[in-house]
Image: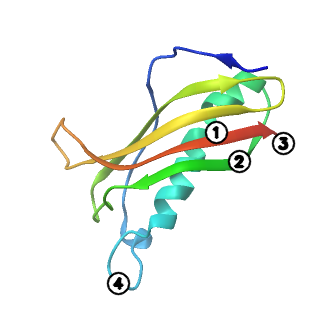
Amino acid sequence: MSAHHAAAVQTLLKTITMPADIDASGQVPTGWLLAKMDQAGAVLPGQHFRAPVELVGLADVTLLARPRLGQCVTFTGHLLSSSARDACVAIEAWCEERGQTSGTPLMRAQLRYAPA
């Protein structure tokens, strides 16, 4: 049985795209976003289980845009549900130019984690 939480959205990770993150076409690959999203998504389930977690499912992935070199990328999320077996997190990635406070949405997904 799943426990539903009306948790507030939290900032889980903030990073800046660097030259090493750029692919051969000169863009930040979608895989980079997914990898960072996995890192950010593991925070809340890790707190829930008080143990290392592993990604076991990915759903409702929507790519809206890709970040550019030098942009700040913020990953926010909240716990959707949790049980003794797994936890589901809604994650969003946003980018912003340095010095600006408003962001542009990049990607949304629901990630499911289980204790490792």
Please tell me the numbered disc located at residue 103: none
The residue type indicated by label 1 comes to Ala
The residue type indicated by label 3 comes to Ala
For marks 2 and 3, the one nearer the N-term is 2
Reading the image, the residue beneath label 3 is 116
For marks 3 and 1, the one nearer the N-term is 1
Q: CA distance from mark 2 to mark 3?
A: 9 Å
For marks 4 and 2, the one nearer the N-term is 4
Q: CA distance from mark 1 to mark 2?
A: 8 Å
Going by the image, does 27 lie left or right of 92? left
Residue count near mark 2 (Cα–Cα under 10 Å), binned few <14, some 14–19, many ≥20: some
The residue sitting at 61% across, 43% down in the picture is: 111
Q: Is residue 64 above or below residue 85?
A: below
Specify the quadrant that holds the N terminus.
top right
For marks 3 and 4, the one nearer the N-term is 4
Quadrant assignment, res 18? bottom left
The residue sitting at 18% across, 37% down in the picture is: 102
Reading the image, the residue beneath label 2 is 55
Reading the image, the residue beneath label 1 is 42
Q: Is residue 114 above or below residue 5?
A: below
The residue sitting at 62% across, 28% down in the picture is: 44
Please tell me the numbered disc located at residue 25: 4
Label 1 with label 4: CB-CB less than 8 Å: no
The location of residue 93, given as percent across then percent down, is 39, 45
Q: Nearer the viewer, residue 3 or 41?
A: 3
Q: Nearer the viewer, residue 23 or 62?
A: 62
Label 3 with label 1: CB-CB less than 8 Å: no
Label 1 with label 2: CB-CB less than 8 Å: yes
